[in-house]
Image (tube, rainbow, N blue to C red):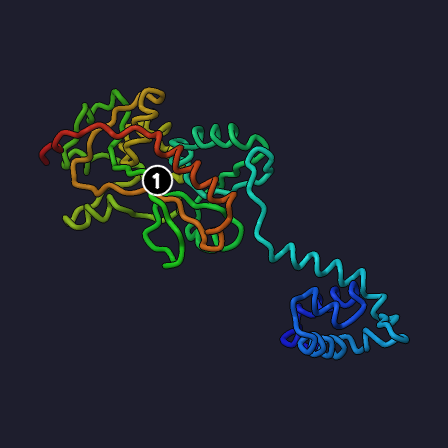
Amino acid sequence: MKPAELDLNLLTVFEAIAEARGVTRAADRLGLSKAAMSRALGRLRAAVGDPVLVRSGNEWALTERARGLVEQVGSLAREARQVLSAPESFRPATSEREFRVHATDHVVSLIGAALCKRVADEAPRASVRFLPILPDDVPALSDGVDLAIGVFPRLPADFRTQVLFEDRFACVARADHPSVRGRLTLERYLQLQHVLIAPRGRPGGVVDDALAERGLTRHVTRYLPYYLAALELIAKADCVLTMSERLARQHATRFGLQVVKPPLALPSYKIVQVWHPRLGRDRAHAWFRQLVAAAASGLSAPPPRRRPAAG
């Protein structure tokens, strides 16, 4: 039988006939008319190449071929019902699921600890695996990754997203930087050497686009894929770094840094969590997404800013 001709309903028909040992009783079990059951038996006979049910005096009896199929067909029918039935309720307390998340160390540093605590409190046997963000996370989300968290300007229309928090850019330098004393002019900004964080390995970005609109460029001398490594480098160099204000303020004391407003207008940006539509009805996944959102909601609002220094 060709795959296109396969009728899985015949598993249920065979199961009913094997248990009822008669067309009429099998029809009653399935809620079918006797005529419909007879037609179904005809299709079953054609599928297995065997009469399946034969007369034995005044009773019906299974053929030897059918007897040999009873256990196998019963197992297949049970598996089919299990596959097609509604999923069991998700129980966090006993779940051992691993949730795979693509994110930058920016995101993990801001909400990772709060998220992992919430997971540990509700699902102590579950695990979270953070993985690096990719140049293109779409294939990974389509094949096994639960979430990607970050900035995603271009996604397939059917992908699901949720805004977690908003961030904005700040300039960071070591606290005793001789050219940055609580403020930066555009002229001074362009004279300095810059560190660029490129999590996806691409050059350029929002800052360079904003400068290009004015016909300006900056001198980038260090490229790093990680935010925290960039902060540690800045703490020991005379460079300047333009990056997430939230993260910079969180680690300013730790690394001995000053955080100032950029001397040019830069748009704020939204950090979102993204998932594939195949996970839309996954109860465990919905639970995990809620924990991610709850962890992000605990972030404090960034402080108000003064007007940028004149260039």
Q: Would residue 134 be found to the left or right of residue 223 on screen?
A: right
Quadrant of the image occupied by residue 80? bottom right
Q: Residue furthest front?
A: 58
Q: Would residue 6 be found to the left or right of residue 206 on screen?
A: right
Q: Is residue 119 visible?
A: yes
- Residue closest to the eye, 193 or 15: 15
The C terminus, quarter of image: top left
- Residue at 89% from the left image edge and 75% from the top image edge: 56
- Residue at 82% from the left image edge and 74% from the top image edge: 53
Residue 111 image position (x, y, % from top left): 40, 32
Residue that badge 1 annotates: 164
Residue 247 image position (x, y, % from top left): 33, 31
- Residue closest to the eye, 278 or 307: 278
Q: Is residue 228 visible?
A: no
Number of labelled discs? 1
- Residue closest to the eye, 19 or 188: 19
Q: Is residue 174 above or below residue 190?
A: above
Q: Would residue 162 be found to the left or right of residue 87 on screen?
A: left
Quadrant of the image occupied by residue 69? bottom right
Q: Is residue 159 above or below residue 254?
A: below
- Residue at 84% from the left image edge and 76% from the top image edge: 54
Q: Would residue 300 be found to the left or right of residue 72 on screen?
A: left
Kind of residue indicated by mark 1? Leu
Residue 242 image position (x, y, % from top left): 27, 36
- Residue at 63% from the left image edge and 56% from the top image edge: 83
Q: Secondary structure at mark 1?
A: strand
Mark 1 Cα-neighbour bin, 10 Å: few <14, some 14–19, many ≥20: some
Residue 285 image position (x, y, % from top left): 49, 44
The N terminus, quarter of image: bottom right
Q: Residue furthest right?
A: 57
Quadrant of the image occupied by residue 253? top left
